[in-house]
Image (tube, rainbow, N blue to C red):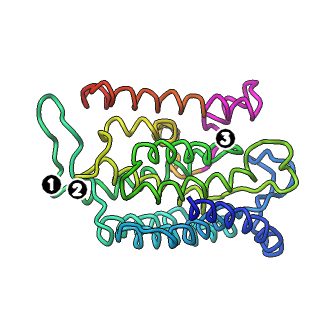
């Protein structure tokens, strides 16, 4: 608890400390085009959260597999920060994300070995475990990246997922790590939720933060659904990230049907559509977080009632 509190405090302190530096070097999100905010906003959340996460997890006992994962978090944070400032090509970002996923699989040994029991048969991935895990990690990383479009949404979804994983992992070796990660996100949200009073210090997480959060949620989810430490079935756990995952796939399909790159930005995400059709940004945030809570409840209830993996996945 002390480590989690210190991680929260460090994140908050760096959110303040990095603000003038970001303004000085141009690490700000300037309004215009697809961006509807009124004034330039510092993009420092990813950096602050990575510092808080690194310090907080250094103060606790954690599995040896965490160190390579943290290195992956730093990698996507650095590349994401460069992208937030200079707008890197999509293939460069994907290479960095793939390297982080490789660290998860081959340096940490966090691998999806099985998908559950379907129609009376246990589905084990065998030789496909590593490529499937890499693909899954990349999916979650980009899911959280794509969903980051209005204040509080990406951070709120990540915090919800981490809080559920923390509750499920209580008493397990991963519990301190998940708790620290959740507190780090909570520290950032003080500067990002549309609270009104935080307007003068409003900040964004940028690609640096969204991709790092996707990586953290993905790896902790894999850890808690596989092997001897599994606390919930993989198909049920997918419901905890249903909103960002559906957003990712619907966006890819929409852009491909329009004969555009899946990574080409647009203003047609669900949160944009809701806001453009009459909902305030705060109401949009509440609605989408409410959907995420509902989906998470379905996953938890399905696992509690031992609903078959086939039904939960379908």
Residue under the point 39% across and 50% down = 221
Task: State which quarter of the image contains the N terminus.
Answer: bottom right
Instruction: Give the left or right position of residue 281, taking residue 160 as reference.
Output: right
| Residue under label 3 | 267
Q: Main secondary structure of the magenta part?
A: helix
Kindly report the distance in space between the C-alpha atoms of the residues bearing marks 2 and 3: 36 Å
Q: Nearer the viewer, mark 2 or mark 3?
A: 2
* Label 2 CA crowd tier, 10 Å (few <14, some 14–19, many 20+): some
Residue under the point 54% across and 42% down = 160
Residue under the point 21% across and 47% down = 114
Task: State which quarter of the image contains the C terminus.
Answer: top left
Q: Which mark is residue 126?
A: 1
Q: Position of residue 150 (x, y in %)?
A: 69, 43
Tell me which segment is drawn in magenta.
265-288
Q: Position of residue 14 (x, y in %)?
A: 72, 68
Q: Which mark is residue 10?
A: none
Residue 64 to residue 181: above or below = below
**33 or 111, nearer to the observer:** 111
Q: Is residue 281 part of the magenta span, yes or no?
A: yes
Instruction: Give the left or right position of residue 75, taking residue 17 as reference.
Output: left
Q: Nearer the viewer, mark 3 or mark 1?
A: 1
For the residues bearing labels 2 and 1, Cβ distance under 8 angstroms: yes
Secondary structure type for disc 3: loop
Residue 165 to residue 96: above or below = above
Q: Which mark is residue 129?
A: 2
């Amino acid at each position: 608890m002390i480590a989690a509190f210190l991680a929260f405090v460090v994140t908050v302190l760096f959110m303040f400390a990095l603000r003038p530096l970001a303004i000085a070097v141009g690490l700000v999100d300037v309004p215009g085009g697809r961006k509807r905010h009124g004034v330039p906003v510092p993009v420092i959340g990813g950096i602050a959260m990575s510092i808080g996460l690194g310090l907080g997890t250094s103060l606790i006992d954690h599995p040896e597999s965490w160190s390579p994962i943290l290195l992956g978090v730093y990698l996507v944070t650095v590349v994401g920060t460069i992208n937030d400032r200079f707008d890197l090509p999509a293939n460069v970002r994907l290479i960095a994300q793939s390297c982080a996923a490789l660290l998860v699989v081959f340096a940490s040994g966090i691998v999806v070995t099985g998908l559950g029991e379907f129609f009376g048969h246990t589905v084990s991935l065998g030789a496909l475990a590593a490529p499937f895990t890499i693909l899954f990690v990349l999916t979650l990383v980009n899911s959280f990246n794509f969903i980051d479009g209005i204040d509080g949404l990406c951070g709120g979804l990540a915090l919800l997922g981490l809080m559920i994983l923390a509750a499920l992992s209580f008493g397990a070796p991963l519990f301190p790590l998940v708790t620290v990660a959740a507190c780090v996100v909570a520290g950032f949200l003080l500067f990002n939720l549309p609270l009104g009073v935080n307007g003068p210090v409003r900040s964004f997480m940028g690609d640096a933060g969204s991709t790092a959060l996707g990586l953290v949620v993905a790896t902790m989810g894999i850890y808690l659904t596989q092997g001897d430490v599994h606390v919930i079935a993989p198909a049920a756990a997918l419901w905890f990230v249903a909103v960002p995952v559906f957003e990712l796939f619907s966006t890819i399909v929409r852009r491909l049907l329009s004969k555009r790159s899946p990574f080409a930005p647009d203003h047609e995400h669900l949160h944009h559509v809701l806001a453009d059709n009459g909902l305030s940004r705060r109401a949009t945030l509440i609605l989408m977080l409410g959907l995420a809570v509902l989906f998470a409840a379905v996953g938890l209830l399905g696992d509690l009632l031992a609903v078959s993996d086939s039904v939960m996945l379908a």
